[in-house]
Image (cartoon, helix red, strand yellow):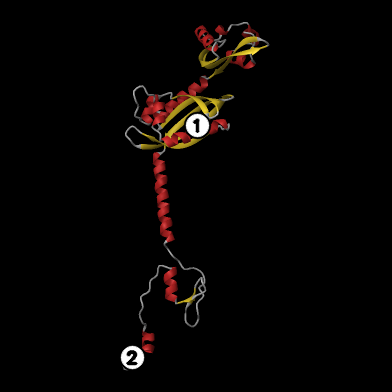
Amino acid sequence: MIECNPAACRLYGYCREEMLSMAVADLIPEGMVRTFATEVAEGSAFAPIQGKRKNGALFTGEARISRIAQAGRGYIMWQVRDISSRLRANEQLHLILAGMRGMVWQARVRHLGGDAMDWQISVPNEAAAQQFLPLQMLPGQSYLQAFYQNRLPEERQKMDQVSREALLDGKSGYSQEFLCLRADGVLRWIYEDVRIEPQEPGCWRLTGLCTDVTERKQAETEREELVLQLQEAISQVKILRGLLPICASCKRIKDEADRWRPIESYIRDHSEAEFSHGIGPECAQKLYPEIFRNSP
């Protein structure tokens, strides 16, 4: 070992002088070192490791090993990250999800250029996922493969675009809703909330939580249908408001086109009222005096 940074010293618990006097195999199991050496010969390697601190405590980490050249000489650079706390958080999350309708997935995504993305995705607990959303799985098919295939084709393209844009735009996360076909042939609405953690340029770690929101979507649809029905009913109700210009003599009303119309015609067109004609007693005596002249 020819150099180390302060973060490496804090991670393993050694001072810089102690670290520089050690071999890589003193910090990482020798079997892993040999495996990494083979993979690094082809470019770079990335894998989980079991590390050991100065006080003897073990931790789970991730190691990225790559070849670099400087001043005409070749070197191997190790980057180690402690992920113990993240794994404990995932275990606690799995316990929580066991009592709710939800599924967690994790992914490591690398940008290959253009629109191409390399997804390394996994579901920590496939049994819990299958309990959350039972899927029809083909022989040899993983739950995630079935989860992807049972989405509507047009939604797969839309979801790929949403995730790709969120990653390339530097967003901290994204969310979306989509339909997924359950094993019994019933379509269920799934809400997916994803957090994005940048790892290095063009590489991200994603954690997604999927929940079933079918009942909420059905309630929203029913509410929208009810609103449309109410709007339709309201549109058919005609109410007269404001001042009406009416002739003091003939009682005709002036309409929007400045035409003087009989009052019953105007009201019929501007309300739900209908007229049935008759003659009141006073008008009857005026119009037919001969009938009422001899009346008691």
Q: Report if residue 57 is visible in the image.
A: no
- Looking at the image, residue 135 sits to the left or right of residue 16; the answer is left
Q: Position of residue 116 (x, y in %)?
A: 52, 27
Q: Position of residue 81 (x, y in %)?
A: 56, 18
* Residue drawn at 36 percent across, 21 percent down: 140
Residue 178, relative to residue 60: is it above or below? below
Helix, strand or loop at label 1? It is strand
Q: Which label sits on residue 18?
A: none
- Examine the image and state in which quarter residue 179 appears: top left
The CA span between labels 2 and 1 is: 90 Å
Question: Which label sits in the foreground, 2 or 1?
Answer: 1
Q: Which label sits on residue 292?
A: 2
Q: Earlier in the sequence, mark 2 or mark 1?
A: 1
Q: Report if residue 273 is visible in the image.
A: yes
Few, some or many residues within 10 Å of mark 1 (<14, 14–19, 20+): some
Can you name the residue that lies furthest to the bottom here? 294
Residue 142, relative to residue 57: is it above or below? below
* Residue drawn at 38 percent across, 31 percent down: 132
Q: Quadrant of the N terminus?
A: top right
Q: Position of residue 9 (x, y in %)?
A: 62, 13
Q: Amino acid at mark 1?
A: Val
Few, some or many residues within 10 Å of mark 2 (<14, 14–19, 20+): few
Residue 7, relative to residue 195: is it above or below? above
Q: Which label sits on residue 194?
A: 1
